[in-house]
Amino acid sequence: MKGYDKHNQDLIMIIGILVLIIIGLGIYIFYDKGWIFSSNRNDVNEIEENTVPIEEEQQNLSYKIGDVVILKNSTSWNVMEESPESNDFVTLLSSENINDGTIAVNNAENYVTTTYKNKLQTELNASNSDILESRLLTLEDVGILSGIATTSLQIGTTLENNITPQFLYKQDTITNFFNKNNPVMVCSPIVEYRKINSGRLCLGIQTGSLPIRPVIKISKKYIQSI
């Protein structure tokens, strides 16, 4: 009987030791794996916190006058005003003539400020607050870019003065200013007569359709990433 009791005691002791071992392993695994998981979570959080969305990176870029940018609808534009990183918007002049021949001179300004702006919003899936303005080029714009006082800008005034960026006069475009009912235009050089016909201000006709290069002020988030 004593041998039986001794056997039971040994068995209970072995079971107790096994239980303690199992508990010890459980505690080790819990804290060890828990620490690893916690560490991994911290690493993931750190990566997420330090990762800047691509759109935000693009929005924070700075732009200089003359920079070429492509909007997300694949249209090409030139930067008209310096825009530092702190500015979410940039002012652009279209590199392309948007007049397909159906926009009359006397309807150009209304078309650009309403129809074209709405079309651009739709193409970019932009809100009204993302495009602050859509308008025609002005003589004030020409004066700022050329360094010529607005009061000194006359029909025939050359814009090729080593100040004016070439993008302004590389293509014809009307302005919002009229002289005796005729639209004042920025005209590109006539290659074969360049010495006497440089990039300049000229006078357009009041009938028919003329080239239109709109000016917009738009959120930088709609500029394609390079």
Image: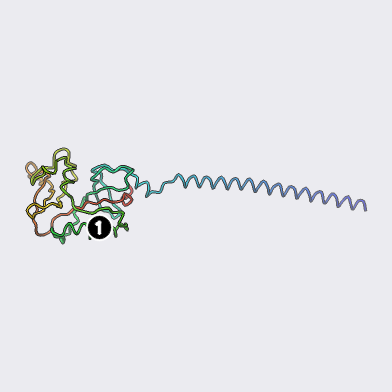
Could you tell me which residue is drawn at 19 percent across and 59 percent down?
111
Left or right of residue 7: residue 219: left
Q: Nearer the viewer, residue 181 or 48?
A: 181
In this view, the residue farthest toward the bottom is 102
Q: Position of residue 31 (x, y in %)?
A: 64, 46
Left or right of residue 123: residue 189: left
In this view, the residue farthest toward the top is 162
Residue flagged by tag 1: what amino acid is it?
Lys
Q: Is residue 67 above or below residue 104?
A: above
Q: How many numbered badges does the structure rendering display?
A: 1
Question: Would you name the residue on which mark 1 appears?
Answer: 117
Q: Position of residue 183 (x, y in %)?
A: 11, 53
Left or right of residue 37: residue 27: right
Left or right of residue 213: residue 179: left
Q: Secondary structure at mark 1?
A: helix
Q: Where is residue 147, by image quadrant?
A: top left
Q: Where is residue 211, by image quadrant?
A: bottom left
In this view, the residue farthest toward the right is 1
Could you tell me which residue is drawn at 92 percent across and 51 percent down?
2
Q: Is residue 175 above or below residue 144?
A: below
